[in-house]
Amino acid sequence: MKKIILALSITWLSSVSFAQSKPTFTYDVSGSSGTYNDRSYTEIHLGLNWNMTEWFNWRNSVFTQFGSDLNTVWGLDTTGLFRTEFYTQGRDLGIEFFAGPGLRLANEKSSAALGTAGITLALGGLRIGGGATYLNYFETRQDKLDQDLPKDEVQYFITLSGGGSF
């Protein structure tokens, strides 16, 4: 049984310029919510992005997921994201596409293989995007009531982002 999870994600991203040849680091903080077996959950991420080239980003994000009648899950999502972008000369207007495989390393039998893909529209310092993440869990997970949770999961996300840097 496949369960589709709809998640709304609000993300703060650091500013980055991919026009340079050396790797850069950016950070992000995001939160989302969804449901399993008619019970809601919240997931919070703190991510570090290593923009190794203008076409590849290695993203590592520590996360926690908690909710009603669900075991609290925490761990690390690590993803290799291939990307391409199309911007105007001053980078005030653009579009970015990204996709890649990854792993979720987590407690509570919640480790999984994952794949994610999405699109981001940029207008000045504002970015609005969306996409989907597919997770295939390695083991059968259960909630606090010993009911099985889905083995496969698709999370749809919407991202709103702005500036900040370090």
Image (cartoon, grey):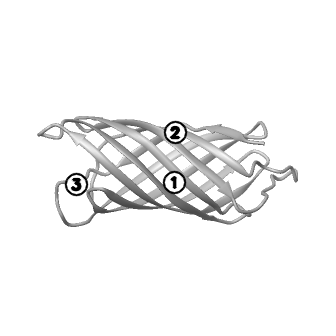
Nearer-the-camera pick, 62 or 90: 90
For marks 3 and 1, the one nearer the N-term is 3
Q: Which residue is mark 2?
A: 157
Disc 3 residue type (three-letter): Phe
- Classify residue 133 as left or right of residue 93: right
Residue at coordinates 56% horizontally, 58% vertically from top-left? 63
Disc 1 residue type (three-letter): His
- The vertical placement of 97 against 113, above or below, is above
Mark 2 and mark 3: Cα distance apart in space: 24 Å
Disc 2 residue type (three-letter): Phe
Q: Which residue is mark 3?
A: 18
Q: Which class describes the residues within 10 Å of circle 1: few (<14), some (14-19), or many (20+)?
A: many
Viewer-side label of 1, 2: 2
Expressed as whole percent of the image width and height from the top left, the position of residue 64 reads: 60, 56
Q: Which class describes the residues within 10 Å of circle 3: few (<14), some (14-19), or many (20+)?
A: some
For marks 2 and 3, the one nearer the N-term is 3
For marks 1 and 2, the one nearer the N-term is 1
- Label 2 residue SS: strand
- Label 1 residue SS: strand
Q: Which residue is mark 1?
A: 45
